[in-house]
């Protein structure tokens, strides 16, 4: 019989409980103590596997990045490029933050965490190279990295102001116009893409994305445990 990796199971249990608390009551309201108490585990044992709460958030953000992009490409279904998916991704995140303070706390925490922000920027740089390379043929990897330094700041400001007196569509259209402009998208295409986003049911898409992500986290953790236990 194959030996069970108990350490891997413990790490998975910690991530699963942390993810549940982050998404149910918010990252800021979750503590290492609340996670360890729920697992009937000492704080020392938990921090042996994950030094800080931020390291646990990074696990969830890494999972979100790949999931959210696949979801947006499916929803946008442009048939030509993934520019619409880029536009819809930020719109859906902003809408989710507009309606749910817990989700807003999750995204803002991710954008203010150096570990998580590095993951977001790396992920977004690779997407940007795929989507915008035809408009920035002369750009190097460094230039795409520098662009993401600016764009992550724009995204953060857009999410941070959720619930403010500035209408959501005003914030989104301004942010998307700047982001697409940075990547050299002609003005007529920028206007057409932004207009199309607002013609979509982006409010429902934003809510659905978060609901589907919560299910995806549960399913991913369940599958990872089955893989460790070699359960088919």
Image (cartoon, helix red, strand yellow):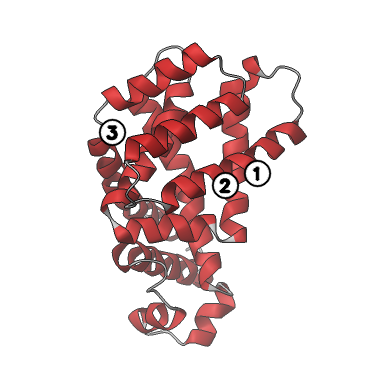
Separation (CA) of disc 2 from disc 1: 7 Å
**Label 1 residue SS:** helix
**Does 210 sit left or right of 7 as displayed?**
left
Q: Which residue is mark 1?
A: 149
**Label ID, residue 153:** 2
**Label ID, residue 202:** 3
Q: Are marks 2 and 1 in contact (CB under 8 Å)?
A: yes
Q: Earlier in the sequence, mark 1 or mark 3?
A: 1
Q: Is residue 120 above or below residue 84?
A: below
Residue 202, percent from left and from top: 28, 33
Mark 2 Cα shell of 10 Å, populated few (<14), some (14-19), many (≥20): few
Residue 229, quarter of picture: bottom left
Residue 113, percent from left and from top: 56, 61
Residue 76, percent from left and from top: 36, 24
* Mark 3 or 2, closer to the camera: 2
Q: Are marks 3 and 2 in contact (CB under 8 Å)?
A: no
The residue shown at (32%, 61%) is: 102
The residue shown at (41%, 40%) is: 68
**Does 203 sit left or right of 122 as displayed?**
left
Q: Earlier in the sequence, mark 3 or mark 2?
A: 2
**Does 28 sit left or right of 178 as displayed?**
left
Q: Is residue 139 above or below residue 188?
A: below
């Amino acid at each position: 019989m194959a030996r069970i990796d108990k350490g891997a199971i413990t790490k998975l249990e910690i991530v699963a409980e942390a993810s549940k608390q982050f998404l149910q009551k918010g990252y800021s309201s979750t503590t290492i103590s609340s996670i360890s108490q729920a697992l009937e585990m000492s704080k020392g044992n938990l921090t042996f596997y994950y030094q800080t709460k931020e390291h646990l958030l990074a696990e969830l953000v890494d999972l979100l990045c790949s999931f959210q992009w696949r979801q947006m490409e499916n929803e946008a279904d442009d048939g030509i490029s993934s520019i619409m998916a880029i536009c819809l991704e930020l719109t859906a995140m902003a809408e989710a933050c507009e309606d749910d303070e817990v989700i807003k706390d999750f995204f803002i925490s991710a954008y203010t965490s150096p570990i998580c922000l590095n993951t977001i920027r790396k992920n977004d740089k690779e997407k940007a190279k795929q989507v915008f390379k035809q408009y920035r043929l002369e750009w190097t990897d460094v230039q795409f990295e520098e662009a993401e330094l600016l764009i992550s700041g724009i995204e953060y400001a857009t999410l941070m102001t959720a619930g403010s007196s500035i209408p959501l569509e005003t914030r989104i259209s301004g942010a998307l116009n700047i982001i697409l402009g940075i990547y050299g998208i002609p003005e007529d295409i920028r206007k057409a893409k932004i207009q199309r986003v607002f013609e979509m049911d982006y409010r429902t898409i934003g809510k659905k994305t978060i609901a589907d992500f919560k299910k995806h986290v549960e399913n991913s953790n369940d599958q990872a445990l089955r893989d460790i236990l070699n359960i088919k």
